[in-house]
Amino acid sequence: MFPAEKLDLILRRHEEIGHRLAEGVDSSAFSALSRELAELEPVAVAIRAFRDLEHEIADLEQLAADPQTDAEMRALAEEELPGLKGRLAGAEHDLKLALLPRDAADEKGAILEIRAGTGGDEAALFAGDLFRMYQRYAEHRGWTMELISASEGTAGGFKEIIAQVRGKGVFARLKFERGAHRVQRVPVTETQGRIHTSAATVAVLPEAAEVDLAINDADLRIDTMRAGGAGGQHVNKTESAIRITHIPSGLVVMMQEERSQHRNKAKAMDVLRSRLFDMERQKLADARAADRKQQVGSGDRSERIRTYNFPQGRVSDHRINLTLYKIDKVMEGEALDEILDPLIADHQARLLAETEEGAAA
C-alpha cells in the first residue's frame, strides 16, 4: 500500500505550484515551476483516480453492510463492488508506474548516431534504411530532425550519419533503439540470390543542456600587478594588469593589454569563460564516446538487439522475444511503436519489480 503521507505531499505540492503560477512569477521561476508541474500532473491524476475509487468502494461496502439499507439498494451495491475492485487494481498499477523514479533525460531531445557495422556496402545501405525509418517515425510523432553530419557509403547509404532529434519525450522512446541492429536480405549487388547478414549500430544520447558558464566568485583568485613591457610611464606606475586563477580547474589567465584594470579584468574573464566552455565541451564529448562504446559494442553481427529479416517479412526484438510480420510498416516508421511500447512496458515492469524488492528488503 502507498504511504498516505507521501501521496498527500505530492498533491499539496501540485496544488501549491498551480496557485503560484496563477498568481504570477518571474520568467525563470515560471519555467522551472512549469516543468515541475508537468512532471507532477500525471502523478496527481493517478493519485486522485486511485483515491476516488477507494472512497467509492468504501461507501458501497458500508452501504451493503448496513442493516438499514434497502434490500434492492444492497443488491445493487454488491453487484457494483467486483467491477470497482477490478478498476481499483488497474488504478493501483497506474499509480505505481506514475510513482516510479523518472529518468531526468526522458523529456530531452536526442543525438541519434547510426554507423555501418559488419557487412561492407550492404551495412552502409542498411544504416541509410535505419536513418530513414527514424526520420519517418519522427514525422509521425511531430518531432523535428536536423542532420548534423553524414559520411556516405561507396554504394549508397551511410558509413556514419548523425542527427539531432527534438520534441517532447524523444529520448524516453528512442533510448530503446540503442544497440546493434542486424539485417538479413538479398543485397541489390548479389547476383546469386543469396541472403546476406549485415549490421549497423545505433547510439542514442540525451541532448546535453547548454553548458552553464556561471562562474562562482569564490572559485577565483584575482591578482593585480604592474604591467610589463613597453608603454611608458603609465605601464610602470599603474597596477592595471590582471591575473585570474580559476581554482577548481587550475586555469590561469593574464591580461595586461589595456590601460584600464577594469577592461583587462573583463577581457580576462571572457578568455577564462571560453577556456572553461571548451573544457566542458571536451568532457561531454568524452562522456558521449564512453556511452557510445558501451551502447553499441563492436558492431559485430552476433551482437544485436533486433533482426530485420526481409525475405520472411519479419522484425524480431531479441530483448523481449517479440516478432512482428510487418517489416514494411516498421521501416516506414508506422509500426515502430508496436515494438517500442512493449519495450517500455517491459522496462517499467522490471523497475516495479526492483522497487517492490527494495521495499520488501
Image (cartoon, rainbow, N blue to C red):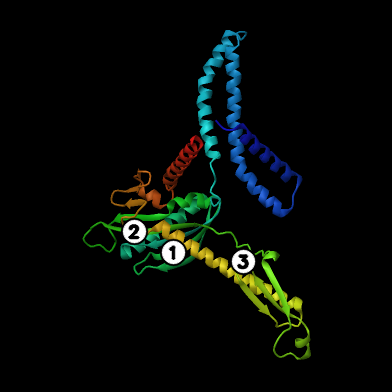
Dot 3 amino acid type = Pro
User: Mark 1 and mark 3 in contact (Cβ < 8 Å)?
Assistant: no
| Label placed on residue 138 | none
- Name the N-terminal-most of marks 3 and 2: 2
How far, Cα to Cα, is label 3 from label 1?
37 Å
Dot 1 amino acid type = Ile
How far, Cα to Cα, is label 1 from label 2?
15 Å
Q: Which residue is mark 2?
A: 199
Q: Left or right: where does residue 283 sit relative to residue 150?
A: right
Q: Residue at x 35, y 70 (%)?
A: 154
Dot 2 amino acid type = Ala
Q: Which residue is mark 1?
A: 161
Q: Quadrant of residue 63?
A: top right
Q: Position of residue 234 (x, y in %)?
A: 78, 87
Q: Left or right: where does residue 125 sit relative to residue 14?
A: left
- Total marks placed: 3
- Name the N-terminal-most of marks 1 and 2: 1
- Name the N-terminal-most of marks 3 and 1: 1
In the image, residue 354 sits, relative to residue 204, either above or below, namely above
How far, Cα to Cα, is label 3 from label 2?
44 Å
Asked which secondary structure carries label 3, the reply is loop
Would residue 115 be visible to someone looking at this image? Answer: yes
Q: Which residue is mark 3?
A: 248
Disc nearest the viewer among 3 and 1 = 3
Q: Position of residue 144 (x, y in %)?
A: 53, 57
- Foreground of the two, 171 or 240: 240
Disc nearest the viewer among 3 and 2 = 3
Q: How many residues crowd mark 1 within 10 Å: few (<14), some (14–19), many (20+)?
A: many
Position of the N terminus, as image quadrant, is top right
